[in-house]
Image (cartoon, rainbow, N blue to C red):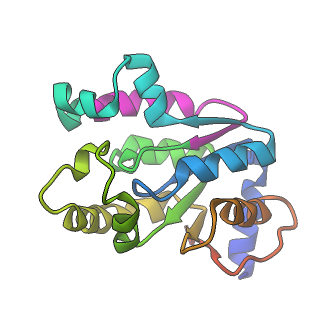
Amino acid sequence: MPPDIAARLESRMSEVSRIFLVGLMGAGKSTVGRLLARDFGLAFVDSDHEIEARSGVPVATIFELEGEAGFRARERRMIEELTRRESIVLATGGGAVIDADNRRDLAGRGFVVYLHTRPENLFVRLKNDRSRPLLQTANPRGRLAQLYRERDVWYREVADLVVETGRQSASKLARQIGQQIRPNPEPAAEVTACNP
């Protein structure tokens, strides 16, 4: 690992009590997040689930009744609150990075991991999932590719680590991430540090 990246990672170790996961829908943020929370002894929160719990309806219903703008306003308030919590692993919604204030809060308040997955792999995972409002379209594969093109730069902008998810299991990914963000990490081939 290059010295400048190693120094940046070391400087963020004090923030290990806040780990934020970003990436497209279906990248595995919730699954990996739960494992990381267990391994680090932190609480796990999924921002979309928290929005649903507080509103009493699924995200799809919020989209239906309030549109994407209404959902994003709720998400903005939730991200602002959750990124201030201590001792947390936070799985964010795939579109959380759209909002510049969310990007600022994520990058400035914790250690951010981007679970990078190519859209063609996500399509295989999500092709039968009817709960994702943004994929309820005639061409969900094309929609995933579009979202990837739009958001990849923002995910990378906030990320301290970019993790190539590939085909490995969630438990292996969690172990690799843990090795990278603990002091004196062991190198992991599939995990790369992101330049600021």
The residue furthest right is 184
- Exactly how many numbered labels are in the figure? 0
Q: Quadrant of residue 133?
A: top left
Tell me the quarter of the image containing the C terminus: bottom right
Tell me the quarter of the image containing the N terminus: bottom right
Q: Quadrant of residue 58?
A: top left
Q: Position of residue 125 (x, y in %)?
A: 41, 62
- Is 16 colored magenta in this rendering? no
- Is 84 colored magenta in this rendering? yes
Position of residue 119 in the picture relative to residue 170 (left or right) = left
Q: Nearer the viewer, residue 5 or 172?
A: 172
The residue sitting at 38% across, 17% down in the picture is: 56
The residue sitting at 38% across, 33% down in the picture is: 75
Above or below: residue 114 compared with residue 98: below
The residue sitting at 34% across, 73% down in the picture is: 120
Position of residue 149 in the picture relative to residue 17 (left or right) = left
Q: In this picture, which residue range is highlighted in magenta?
A: 71-90
The residue furthest left is 138
Q: Position of residue 59 (x, y in %)?
A: 33, 32
Q: Position of residue 140 (x, y in %)?
A: 22, 60
Position of residue 165 in the picture relative to residue 140 (left or right) = right
